[in-house]
Image (cartoon, grey):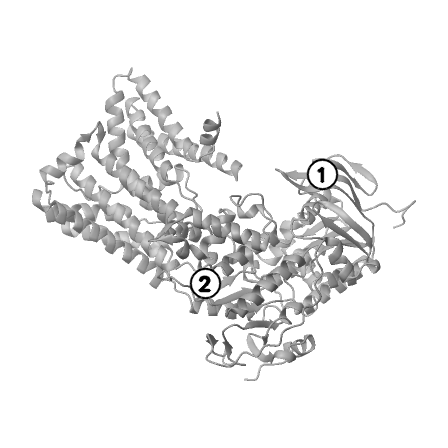
């Protein structure tokens, strides 16, 4: 196909303005995506990234501003127009139907897969795409999506977005695609993104992991409070200058205090999983990292520990363990409730006498934590779903930290949380650990694992290595991730 | 204006609007002569469905799949056994009530025991339980027709300050239910489990404890209702609970409680129960025969659900 004249932007949004109630989500944004470029979009939680993404994919209609596709202004822009133009989106909140198979989900997204034999065509398309992007994956396209792990769901969603059925894929929006993928899968995806760009496609990449933004994108757009505060080719940015332009105070990589926890009696221990590998134990005041490739038994270990140490029949005055969910929608938020109720639910025993809840005490607790961890909302009476993903995660954090539990289990809790808040969370963790709390932390991010006092590396459902103090390095962890378990 | 607007946003308002409308339509037909009698009868009969409906509401709030189908059998067994214990003797009223409560308690425990131990869905567990309970009721009843104690029979059919006594009892019970749901940890827990049982478990809620308490609460309310109904109607009958199966579920749904769980609505139970009884009496006044009456009732229920449901989805 030959192009006549100068190349037009795949999509161009001019002077976009949007507000939700009193909140200005977009405040006059102009964004043009050229064919064959990868644009990185960074900014804090609530900066308006997800909103602009929803405008581009047609899910939201602009209050003010114009949209042009391939140089032609469009009056009525919606999801259908966007899809017909080849704009696809991979959502941060996974949007597959859990009760359908991978193939059937592909059919839902690609309505042109109709008529006799769509099943066969859909499976071959999605299987081929999965093989292409994630070589060596173990996903059965006939499997129910609900049975897949969260990273597998993300992989399926990515593969369906890149699948070409009827129209050419021109622009794919990836909203936090690597947050639930481990390092090796993320690398595969980013490699594929580069290849896709080479063929003339465009990608908008949103991520809080600045390293991958810098290495993958051609151009980076920094957003703050609904405005673009910086937009330059990525070689002109460094991780440091990116964080600065987002408006955060840059903290150097804090020197990890090497702490030797005297091996007294563990506060928590677990036997070897599946009769393989090493047993698990945790001491008072330790921060323990669970590392390894995603979906190798870390979440199951956390859930097992939680279920074993919390009662299912009677109320406990002091819970022994608290849990911070990573898969918010599965085992985190209560969607019908306000921010207040979502935050206080684990702490109600201390906010009540004889089962009767004191509203004032509850409000006080919520306001304290809202300030401490900077939940961005005008009113804590609003429903939890009015918050952006990262802010919902902050509420879940506060829920667990507010309890008096000695042990806090965290299931990759910083997914979708911005850098400023992460720093905040890290310092809270450190100070709480110094006070004697124990943290067990599964993370898919190497930086976070390297903050831990001790690290267990998982492979195939078992602990294959234990790293202490100075042994906790990226190299050692990666090496151990590929080690088999000693029976 | 603001008050009206805010009222219109409450999901329970529609059941009351419907109830009042039907009341007027009925009164107009009779030329206003029956206004007092109709109100009295409505309050009395609605009281029974309010009591069982409240229990059912707690169970439905526990989330998708939770329902108690043993309600009619529980009512029957509690009513028959309590009458047998009292045997028309005024001094035996308290033991009779205690026996009814004990029966409700035991059935609630057994219901959840079946659900938990055999891992069968509540709909099947409570249905099979209801066969056992109903058979027990048949076995204890043996065609006996025992009159209730005179004091109790009088109490259930008379009024205090113009309002039927059973309606007062229903009012007290629903106020307690409202308080439980809104002010206590237990209420929070029920709502949390209804929204996401996994999230509830991981937030430290004793899920099994809360669920068994809720099934027991539902059975308790059913047995109290059966006890009152048996005394009110001058004796227990084996089919006395049967109409309350659909009724207990219908008043919950029409009343604006989320069918998917997590969100309950106590005032709505009142509106819906009044409405349901008024519909039947309206159709009676207009002289329809039983078949048409049932069909009309069904259509009206569906209509209200559609209306109220559409209104709900707008606010979310």
Q: Is residue B36 above or below residue A254?
A: above
* In this rendering, the label closer to the viewer, 2 or 1: 2
Front residue of B286 and A227: A227
The answer, for residue A178, to whether it is visible in the render is yes
The structure residue drawn at horizontal position 51% and vertical position 38%, both measured from the top left corner, is B313
Q: CA distance from mark 2 to mark 1?
A: 44 Å
Indicate the secondary structure of the residue bearing disc 1.
strand
Q: Which residue lies under the disc numbered 2?
A: A404
Q: Chain of mark 1?
A: A
Q: Is residue A259 left or right of residue A220?
A: left
For the C terminus of chain A, give its image quadrant: bottom right
Front residue of B262 and A280: A280
* Residue B75 pos. (x, y %): 23, 46
* Residue B103 pos. (x, y %): 21, 52
Quadrant location of residue A196?
bottom right
Specify the farthest residue to the bottom: A487
Q: Which residue lies under the disc numbered 1?
A: A17
Quadrant location of residue B12?
top left
Marked residue nearer the N-terminal end (2 or 1): 1
The structure residue drawn at horizontal position 64% and vertical position 80%, both measured from the top left corner, is A471
The answer, for residue B88, to whether it is visible in the render is no
């Amino acid at each position: 196909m030959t192009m006549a004249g100068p190349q037009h932007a795949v999509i161009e949004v001019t002077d976009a303005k949007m507000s939700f109630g009193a909140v200005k989500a977009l405040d006059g944004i102009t964004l043009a995506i050229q064919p064959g470029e990868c644009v990185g979009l960074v900014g804090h939680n609530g900066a308006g990234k997800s909103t602009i993404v929803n405008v581009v994919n047609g899910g939201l209609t602009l209050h003010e501003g114009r949209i042009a596709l391939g140089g032609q202004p469009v009056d009525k822009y919606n999801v259908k127009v966007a899809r017909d133009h080849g704009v696809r989106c991979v959502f941060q909140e996974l949007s597959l139907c859990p009760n359908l198979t991978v193939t059937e989900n592909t059919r839902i997204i690609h309505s042109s897969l109709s008529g006799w034999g769509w099943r066969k065509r859909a499976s071959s398309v999605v299987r081929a795409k999965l093989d292409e992007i994630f070589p060596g994956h173990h996903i059965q396209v006939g499997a129910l999506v609900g049975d897949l792990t969260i990273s597998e769901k993300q992989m399926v969603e990515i593969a369906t977005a890149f699948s070409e059925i009827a129209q050419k894929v021109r622009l794919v929006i990836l909203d936090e695609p690597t947050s639930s993928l481990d390092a090796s899968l993320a690398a595969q995806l980013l490699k594929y993104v580069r290849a896709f760009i080479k063929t003339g496609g465009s990608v908008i990449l949103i991520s809080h992991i600045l390293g991958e933004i810098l290495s993958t994108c051609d151009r980076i757009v920094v957003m703050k409070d609904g405005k673009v505060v910086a937009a330059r080719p990525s070689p002109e940015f460094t991780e440091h200058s990116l964080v600065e332009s987002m408006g955060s105070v840059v903290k150097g990589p804090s020197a990890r205090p090497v702490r030797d926890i005297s091996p007294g009696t563990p506060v928590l221990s677990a036997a070897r999983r599946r009769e393989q590998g090493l047993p698990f134990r945790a001491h008072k005041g330790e921060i323990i990292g669970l590392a390894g490739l995603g979906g190798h038994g870390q979440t199951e270990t956390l859930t097992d520990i939680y279920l074993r140490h919390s009662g299912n029949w009677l109320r406990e005055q002091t819970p022994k363990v608290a849990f911070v969910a990573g898969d918010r929608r599965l085992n985190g938020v209560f969607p019908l409730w306000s921010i207040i109720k979502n935050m206080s639910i684990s702490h109600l025993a201390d906010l009540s006498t004889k089962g009767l809840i004191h509203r004032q005490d509850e409000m006080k607790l919520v306001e304290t934590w809202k300030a401490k961890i900077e939940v961005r909302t005008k009113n804590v009476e609003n429903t939890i779903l009015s918050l952006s993903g990262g802010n919902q995660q902050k509420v879940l954090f506060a829920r667990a930290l507010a309890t008096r539990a000695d042990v806090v289990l965290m299931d990759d809790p910083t997914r979708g949380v911005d850098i400023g808040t992460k720093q905040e969370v890290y310092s809270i963790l450190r100070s709480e650990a110094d006070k004697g709390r124990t943290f067990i932390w599964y993370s898919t991010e190497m930086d976070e694992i390297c903050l831990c006092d001790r690290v267990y590396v998982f492979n195939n459902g078992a602990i294959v290595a234990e790293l202490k103090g100075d042994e906790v390095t990226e190299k050692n962890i990666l090496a151990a991730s590929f080690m088999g378990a000693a029976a | 204006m603001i008050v009206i607007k805010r009222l219109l946003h409450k999901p329970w308002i529609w059941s009351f609007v419907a109830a009042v409308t039907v009341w007027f339509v009925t009164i107009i037909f009779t030329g206003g002569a029956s206004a007092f009698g109709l109100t009295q009868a409505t309050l009395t009969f609605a009281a029974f469905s309010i009591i069982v409906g409240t229990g059912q509401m707690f169970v439905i709030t526990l989330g998708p799949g939770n329902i108690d189908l043993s309600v009619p059998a529980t009512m029957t067994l509690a009513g028959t056994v309590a009458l047998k214990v009292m045997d028309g003797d005024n001094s035996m009223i308290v033991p009779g009530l205690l026996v009814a409560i004990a029966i409700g308690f035991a059935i609630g425990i057994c219901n959840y025991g079946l659900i938990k131990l055999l891992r069968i869905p509540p709909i099947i567990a409570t249905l099979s339980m209801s066969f056992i309970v109903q058979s027990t009721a048949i076995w204890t009843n043996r065609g006996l027709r025992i009159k209730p104690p005179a004091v109790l029979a009088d109490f259930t059919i008379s009024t205090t300050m113009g309002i039927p006594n059973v309606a007062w009892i229903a009012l007290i019970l629903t106020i307690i239910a409202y308080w439980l749901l809104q002010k206590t940890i237990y209420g929070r827990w029920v709502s949390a489990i209804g929204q996401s049982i996994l999230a509830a478990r991981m937030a430290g809620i004793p899920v099994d404890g809360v669920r068994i308490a809720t099934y027991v609460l539902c059975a308790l309310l059913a047995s109290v209702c059966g006890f009152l109904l048996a005394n009110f109607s001058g004796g227990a009958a084996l089919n006395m609970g049967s109409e309350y199966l659909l009724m207990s579920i219908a008043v919950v749904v029409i009343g604006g409680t989320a069918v998917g769980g997590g969100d309950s609505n106590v005032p709505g139970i009142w509106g819906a129960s009044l409405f349901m009884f008024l519909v039947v009496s309206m159709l009676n006044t207009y002289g329809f025969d039983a078949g048409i009456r049932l069909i009309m009732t069904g259509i009206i229920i569906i209509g209200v659900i559609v209306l109220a449901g559409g209104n709900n989805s707008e606010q979310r």
